[in-house]
Image (spheres, rainbow, N blue to C red):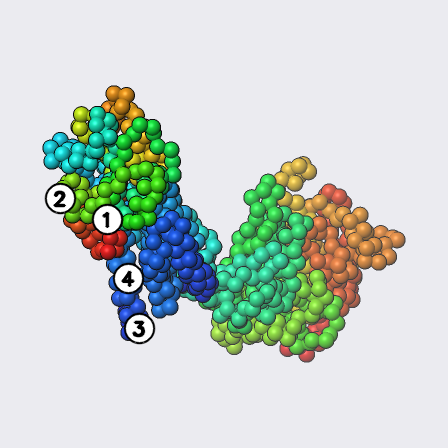
């Protein structure tokens, strides 16, 4: 049973035309039926002539032929369906064939039968198997009636049954062949319009199903061709996220609506991928992976549609856009929470250090976010300093904003936009709120070391002169450099860990020096740049140190001491030393004078000059040292660099001793 | 559910009319063809009455001679071809030929006389009742002893080009026994015509 159905369906498909009659088919059949009727009408005079010539009764031939003509004439005049008219024509054709055999009786009466086969073949022009079948059925009915009237008449010439069957087989064979020809003619010529419409309907249905899928997936799915033009079939999310699509819209156009920078980056990257300037994978890596559309954040994933050649050519791309706003928001909240935890940790470990960082950072944020037209150099240094310190205190959100703004400033020369400044201000306000909650109002607490407390108590009990005691009390507000250096040492170790340099050794020589923290706040804030330089650029990786024959981990020594009338802050590392040649070359490209070694050293503090081979998240822009030099100079200090490749570098910040010591009256005034 | 539009009255009428036309045409066509394809009945040559009637056509000149009788029907187109064949072509020498003509036709009689044929006119009923013959054209050959040696058609197939009558007569005269050819042509008797042409299209 299972096998018979397809065969039956196949036969039915061949024999039965689609029910719909197209305008094209109707026009064709009407024209053909008109010609066919004329053809049948011509049989009247022809058959009369034959009957007259053959002596078979022209008058009866006339009436008989007209009688047969009546059928197709009525059908043509009254039937609306041209296919039905054609079927009547099929029957009439066979009847006309019979008439010819009758009026053409005589020696060639057998030959007159060929007219049946000729007519049967001619009916193929209708392209309708049912017309052929009607004709064949007419012949069959004719023989059945013959058999009914006089059974022996079917077996003419006293023919046996097999002769009759052979006779029938020829009709069947021709009918099958003619049906095949007719159906092929319909499929490929007459009914092509219908076939195309059916196929189109099937495609529409399939497209509709695909449409449903595309309309219900959350992701935006679209494909683009080699020119970047978006194909019409896109998921509903694309239109919802980017707005309506028109024919010929490119993906860069869509991005342009939301983010012109992303559009520009996409255009460049895609062009490189298509033109083969870059390998496809490399070019795709440069395409934007995220874009903000209104208040939504979309991630962009690219699937190349490339030819399967050995050297594939990019022919298009499937782009999947995913609305990651909620995910990003969740990640942001998690990160903020993590930041708060880290802030809490830092406060617990070094409350004073964090408070000082926070005060200094607040000043920097204020400067960056409020001044839209100030000195670009100052802006760069402030951003760089804020970024570095934010990283040291694990404020990733601040770090990222600073890094992004610094990037644009360095690469495109574009100052932070109002939106970016507002975002940074908002981030900082949020952090300030959290910090305030943790610190409360006790940000100006004075911490007294036990030894200082005991000395003060002893002086009061002796009793010491009042100005001595007052000086000792005022001295409590000075900060031991040991505390500061310990803090910096911890930061240095953190930088090394982040850079993958493992645990480094950091030594401290504080020289028992105390400094006014307010006066030195800006210097210490910028001091982190030289520490980063030492760890990042100075110290080698473990493998490089082994190759250079150096034992143990890299070592950085930081210290403060008074040397006569000089107060020196020193940073010393046992790294690879400064590559002065690289500094010289870099300075020359910036148009700086490097005619002497002193000028080369001076160039090291210029913006854009770095000892780094490549940019990292910590350093490499050649900005930090400039900021540090400015801070140093504001305290009347100078910088000396001594470096021996590959034994290490020593950087001395040299200040007048007066700047490091505090006069009692100053302390009293401050108190 | 879509419902197919009902045809109009004229449409239904046209359908009925075409249907009637188809049925009538089929019947008419079949009726015309029946008589063409049917092998017509031949008389029983062993019937003494049949032999006696045929020998009654002999004359004194025919004594101890082969006699050929052509049974032809004046209103049968198949018989017309036989007439043309007999009157227009050279007949074999020494053949004693008679024409048994069903229903008189002066033109045929004149042509037959001109060619020296002896013609006997009979009615359809006489042909059946006296000669037991119901169809024409039929060739009958009687040997000198008065026995019917051949009773059948003239051609190998229906209205074939080649008439076999002279060859059959010669073969018989030479002592052969040619096969009798099937009889195609027209029904002559009322009963046969009714059977072959129930709607009286051909014999009406």
Gap between marks 3 and 4, in whole Å? 16 Å
The residue lying at 30 percent from left, 32 percent from top is: B165
Please name the residue that numbered disc 3 is placed on.
B10
Gap between marks 2 and 3, in whole Å? 54 Å
Gap between marks 2 and 4, in whole Å? 40 Å
The reply to whether residue B8 is in sight is: yes
The residue lying at 30 percent from left, 68 percent from top is: B14
Give above or below for B199 relative to A361: above
Considering the numbered disc 3 on the image, is that residue within a helix, a strand or a loop?
Answer: helix
User: Does label 2 or label 3 sit earlier along the sequence?
Assistant: 3
User: Does label 3 or label 1 sit earlier along the sequence?
Assistant: 3
Q: Nearer the viewer, mark 4 or mark 1?
A: 1
Return the mark for residue B129. Answer: 2
Dot 2 crowding, Cα within 10 Å, few <14, some 14–19, many 20+: few
The image shows residue A665 at horizontal and vertical percentages of 71, 76
Return the mark for residue B103. Answer: 1
Output the chain of dot 1.
B
The reply to whether residue A199 is in sight is: no
Q: Nearer the viewer, mark 3 or mark 4?
A: 4
Q: Nearer the viewer, residue A559 or A92?
A: A92
Return the mark for residue B21. Answer: 4
């Amino acid at each position: 049973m299972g096998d018979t159905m397809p065969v039956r369906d196949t036969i039915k498909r061949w024999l039965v035309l689609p029910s719909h009659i197209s305008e094209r088919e109707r026009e064709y059949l009407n024209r053909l039926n008109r010609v066919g009727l004329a053809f049948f009408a011509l049989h009247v005079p022809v058959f009369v002539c034959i009957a007259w010539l053959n002596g078979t009764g022209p008058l009866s031939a006339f009436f008989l032929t007209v009688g047969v003509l009546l059928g197709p004439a009525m059908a043509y005049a009254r039937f609306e369906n041209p296919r039905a008219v054609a079927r009547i024509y099929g029957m009439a054709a066979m009847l006309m064939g019979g008439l010819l055999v009758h009026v053409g009786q005589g020696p060639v009466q057998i030959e007159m039968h060929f007219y049946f086969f000729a007519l049967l073949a001619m009916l193929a022009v209708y392209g309708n198997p049912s017309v052929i079948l009607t004709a064949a059925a007419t012949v069959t009915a004719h023989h059945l009636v013959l058999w009914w009237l006089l059974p022996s008449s079917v077996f003419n010439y006293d023919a046996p049954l097999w002769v009759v069957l052979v006779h029938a087989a020829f009709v069947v064979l021709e009918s099958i062949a003619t049906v095949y020809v007719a159906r092929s003619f319909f499929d490929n010529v007459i009914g092509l319009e219908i076939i195309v419409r059916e196929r189109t309907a099937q495609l529409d249905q399939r497209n509709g199903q695909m449409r449903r899928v595309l309309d219900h997936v959350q992701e935006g799915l679209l494909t683009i061709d080699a020119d970047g033009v978006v194909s019409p079939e896109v998921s509903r999310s694309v239109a919802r996220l980017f707005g309506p699509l028109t024919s010929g819209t490119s993906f860069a156009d869509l991005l342009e609506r939301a983010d012109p920078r992303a559009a520009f980056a996409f255009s460049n990257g895609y062009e490189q991928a298509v033109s083969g300037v870059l390998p496809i994978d490399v070019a795709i890596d440069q395409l934007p992976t995220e874009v903000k559309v209104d208040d939504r954040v979309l991630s962009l994933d690219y699937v190349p549609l490339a030819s399967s050649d050995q050297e594939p050519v990019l022919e298009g791309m499937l782009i999947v856009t995913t609305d990651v706003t909620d995910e990003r928001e969740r990640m942001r909240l998690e990160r903020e929470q993590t930041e708060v935890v880290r802030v809490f940790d830092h406060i617990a470990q070094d409350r004073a250090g964090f408070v000082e960082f926070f005060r200094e950072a607040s000043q920097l944020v204020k400067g960056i976010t409020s001044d839209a037209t100030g000195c670009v150099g100052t802006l760069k240094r402030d951003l760089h300093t804020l970024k570095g310190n934010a990283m040291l205190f694990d404020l990733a959100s601040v770090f990222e904003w600073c890094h992004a703004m610094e990037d644009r400033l360095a690469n495109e020369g574009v100052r932070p936009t109002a939106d970016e400044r507002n975002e940074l201000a908002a981030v900082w306000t949020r952090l300030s709120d959290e910090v305030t909650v943790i610190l409360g109002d006790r940000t100006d607490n004075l911490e007294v070391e036990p030894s200082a407390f005991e000395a003060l108590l002893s002086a009061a009990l002796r009793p010491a002169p009042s100005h001595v005691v007052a000086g000792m009390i005022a001295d409590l507000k000075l900060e031991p450099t040991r505390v500061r250096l310990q803090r910096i040492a911890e930061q240095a170790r953190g930088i090394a860990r982040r850079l993958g340099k493992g645990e480094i050794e950091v030594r401290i020589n504080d020289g028992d020096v105390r400094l006014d923290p307010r006066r030195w706040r800006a210097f210490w804030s910028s001091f982190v740049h030289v520490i980063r330089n030492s760890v990042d650029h100075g110290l080698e990786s473990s493998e490089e140190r082994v190759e250079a024959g150096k034992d143990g981990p890299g070592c950085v020594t930081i210290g403060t001491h008074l040397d006569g009338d000089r107060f020196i802050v020193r940073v010393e590392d046992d790294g690879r030393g400064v590559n002065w040649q690289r500094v010289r070359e870099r300075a020359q490209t910036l148009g700086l004078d490097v005619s002497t070694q002193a000028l080369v050293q001076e160039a090291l503090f210029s913006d854009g000059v770095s000892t780094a081979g490549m940019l990292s998240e910590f350093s490499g822009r050649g900005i930090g040292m400039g900021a540090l030099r400015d801070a140093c100079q504001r305290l009347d200090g100078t910088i000396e660099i001594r470096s021996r490749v590959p034994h290490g570098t020593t950087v001395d910040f040299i200040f007048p001793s007066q700047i490091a010591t505090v006069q009692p009256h100053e302390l009293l005034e401050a108190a | 559910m879509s419902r197919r539009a009902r045809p109009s009255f004229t449409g239904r009428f046209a359908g009925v009319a075409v249907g009637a036309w188809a049925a009538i045409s089929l019947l008419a066509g079949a009726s015309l063809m029946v008589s063409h394809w049917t092998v017509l009945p031949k008389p029983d040559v062993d019937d003494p009455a049949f032999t006696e009637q045929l020998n009654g056509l002999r004359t004194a000149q025919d004594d101890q001679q082969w006699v050929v009788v052509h049974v032809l029907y004046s209103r049968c187109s198949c018989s017309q071809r036989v007439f043309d064949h007999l009157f227009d072509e050279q007949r074999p020498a020494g053949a004693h030929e008679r024409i048994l003509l069903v229903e008189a036709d002066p033109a045929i009689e004149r042509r037959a006389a001109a060619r020296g044929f002896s013609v006997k006119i009979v009615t359809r009923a006489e042909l059946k009742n006296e000669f037991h013959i119901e169809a024409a054209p039929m060739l009958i050959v009687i040997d000198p002893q008065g026995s019917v040696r051949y009773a059948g058609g003239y051609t190998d197939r229906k209205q074939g080009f080649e008439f076999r009558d002279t060859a059959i007569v010669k073969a018989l005269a030479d002592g052969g026994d040619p096969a009798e050819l099937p009889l195609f042509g027209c029904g002559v008797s009322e009963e046969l015509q009714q059977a072959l042409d129930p709607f009286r299209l051909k014999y009406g």
